[in-house]
């Protein structure tokens, strides 16, 4: 939606080229690079046809399910108000609810089932299987990062500690998996994770030093979540 609009707008004012940046999740950002490149060769190309062709070429018999998966994220982005009076990051992240991620995972499960019953060459099946695996890791990373930011912005610092530790464990597993070397910029993700761990260290010390037992920390966390501030 936004790319279709923006490329056309910039072309009317003499667009010469595009420099694209993405988040550390390379594989889930691919379409955002592919569409502008195709429009660079033909500014009047049918964007819907480009998108359909991308999913068909990349995912074969699983294309319809993965296309719906991608459409979920596009709809979420385009539905967030964009003006100076609103916090875009918070509004965007609030859209990443447990129900949203459950639906997205269901579409990837559906894609795997469609692939399993399709009559295609074994080599092509393996390629598509690996692509779906990269998308699944991208979804998991999105879910975990959104949860960490949501907890941080809500002041749930004990949960933030756990979120960051979980992300560090995930990055370590991805670093050890050669099949995921091009799925995510793990080095950048690890650096960001380490930076946030350092920033939260003082909060962790403030929390853990006076509250010695894990049981009491859980009790206080439940009280804070319920809106209690004194006890």
Image (cartoon, rainbow, N blue to C red):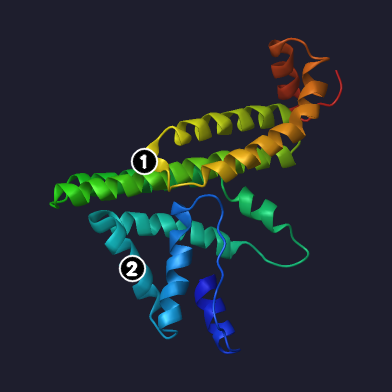
Residue 133 horizontal side relative to residue 57, left or right: right
Q: Position of residue 178 (x, y in %)?
A: 38, 38
Disc 1 or 2, which lies upstream in sequence?
2
Decide: is 31 above or below 171: below
Number of numbered discs present?
A: 2
The structure residue drawn at horizontal position 70% and vertical position 37%, both measured from the top left corner, is 196
Q: Position of residue 228 (x, y in %)?
A: 81, 26
Q: Position of residue 53 (x, y in %)?
A: 31, 68
Residue 76 horizontal side relative to residue 162, left or right: left
The structure residue drawn at horizontal position 68% and vertical position 32%, both measured from the top left corner, is 160
The residue pinned by badge 1 equals: 179
Name the foreground residue: 192 vs 62: 192
Q: Judge whether residue 98 can be spotted in this image.
A: no
Residue 5 horizontal side relative to residue 61, left or right: right
Distance, label 1 to label 2, CA atoms, is 26 Å
Q: Position of residue 133 (x, y in %)?
A: 36, 43
Check disc 1 and report its element: helix, strand or loop.
Answer: helix
Q: Judge whether residue 83 can be spotted in this image.
A: yes
Image quarter hosting the C terminus: top right
The residue pinned by badge 2 equals: 52
Pointer 2: residues within 10 angstroms few (<14), some, or many (20+)?
some
The structure residue drawn at horizontal position 48% and vertical position 40%, both measured from the top left corner, is 140
The structure residue drawn at horizontal position 38% and vertical position 80%, both measured from the top left corner, is 46
């Amino acid at each position: 939606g936004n790319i279709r609009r923006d490329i056309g707008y910039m072309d009317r004012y003499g667009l010469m080229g595009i420099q694209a940046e993405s988040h550390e999740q390379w594989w889930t950002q691919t379409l955002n690079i592919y569409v502008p490149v195709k429009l660079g060769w033909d500014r009047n190309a049918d964007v819907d046809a480009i998108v359909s062709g991308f999913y068909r070429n990349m995912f074969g018999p699983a294309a319809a399910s993965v296309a719906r998966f991608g459409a979920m994220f596009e709809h979420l982005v385009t539905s967030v108000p964009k003006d100076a009076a609103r916090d875009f990051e918070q509004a965007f992240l609030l859209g990443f609810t447990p129900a949203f991620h459950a639906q997205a995972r269901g579409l990837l499960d559906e894609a795997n089932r469609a692939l399993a019953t399709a009559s295609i060459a074994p080599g092509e099946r393996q390629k598509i299987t690996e692509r779906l695996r990269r998308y699944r890791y991208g979804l998991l990373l999105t879910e975990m990062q959104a949860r960490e930011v949501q907890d941080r912005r809500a002041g749930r610092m004990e949960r933030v500690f756990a979120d960051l530790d979980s992300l560090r464990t995930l990055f370590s597993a991805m670093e050890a998996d050669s099949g995921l070397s091009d799925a995510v910029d793990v080095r950048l993700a690890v650096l960001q994770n380490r930076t946030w761990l350092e920033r939260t260290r003082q909060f962790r010390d403030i929390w853990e030093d006076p509250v010695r037992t894990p049981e009491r920390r859980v009790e206080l966390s439940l009280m804070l979540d319920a809106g209690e501030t004194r006890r």
